[in-house]
Image: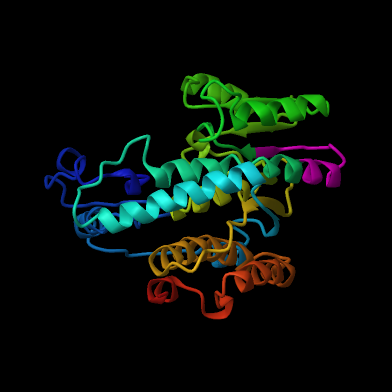
Amino acid sequence: MDEVHNITTESSFDTLLEDYDFRLGLSATPIRHYDPDGSQIISDYFRGVVFTLDLEESIARDILCPYDYIQYYVSLNSEEMDEYQNLTAQIARKIGNRAKYPQKEDDNNPELRRADLVANAENKYHALGEILDTLGNHLSQTLIYCTNNPSSIQPFDSPRQLERVKQILSERHIVSDSVTWEDPTKDRIRILHNLANEHFHCVTAVKCLDEGVDIPSVKTGIFMASSGNPKQYIQRRGRVLRKSSKTGKTHATIYDIIVTPPIPNHDDDISKNERKLIARELLRHKEFARIARNKNDAIDRIRDAARIFNIDLDILDDDYIESIT
């Protein structure tokens, strides 16, 4: 069974049947983010992990190609900063009331609205412009991952990030197409086939291209928006690092556009939670940089961001994050 990480606690009753004596589960990300029960169900059913091949070894064994990791750190503009602080205050109140009132996860959830605000930060478009300038507007075999969620400070019918990126590309005479969850599977296959055959320069995509597709010709990934879920960023990185016998690809490049949140205030509860959120994001950057060809430069950029929030990058890991007070 492939992509076993997509099995939820609820779906396991219909999927993980006891009828089979021999079982094999495949996944690049077997641990379900924030779902220890679901992770345990999968592990128990397949009787634990029997073989692993990590990314560093895959690159060393010439199964995947090496890559450069280039980060662009941007800040929120003044309007976004005001809304960020407003939503942060709402989150603080929610944390304070959590013991008294059950929380319903919905579209008005301040954590989700703040995440969408950050994902849609206006300055990301300036960073994208810098990347395109660096590349001389000559994109080839490129995936640009965007969000299609609306920003909490924009009218609901405003152009989404996916649309705005397509417009930027068009203005620069960069030929592109896009893949969304609305596209039938056959159309996605056609679009990716056209990219592989260089009928256009790049594909803009949302999370429907995170997994389940094989595009070995892709050599550049630009991450306009990413969640903190390891499943997403590991799968996305894997899309870019496949070897290609057709193109003879020798390496890949990943551009990561990241919002540096405002420095946390001195309220104990929210400061702790803010630092944990930032630390988790920096841990993702550290993991990307750790085995990159330009490791030293990438780590230095992360270190500058970590220093602002008093986070020790050298010992940053999951246990460190849990110990933040």
Q: Residue furthest right?
A: 136
> Picture coordinates of residue 258 (x, y %)?
63, 52
Q: Is residue 3 left or right of residue 59?
A: left
Q: Is residue 43 above or below residue 143?
A: below
Q: Which quadrant would the C terminus be assigned to in this image? A: bottom left
Q: Is residue 32 above or below residue 312?
A: above
Considering depth in this image, is 55 or 68 the residue closer to the camera? 68
> Picture coordinates of residue 244 (x, y %)?
66, 45
Considering depth in this image, is 239 or 73 the residue closer to the camera? 73
Q: Is residue 100 above or below residue 53?
A: above
What residue lies at 62% left-to-right and 47% top-to-bottom? 240
Q: Which corner quadrant of the image does residue 168 belong to?
A: top right
Is residue 229 highlighted in magenta?
no
Q: Is residue 68 left or right of residue 282?
A: right
Asked if one can make out residue 232 in the rendered structure from this viewpoint, the answer is: no
Q: Which residues are magenta?
A: 129-143
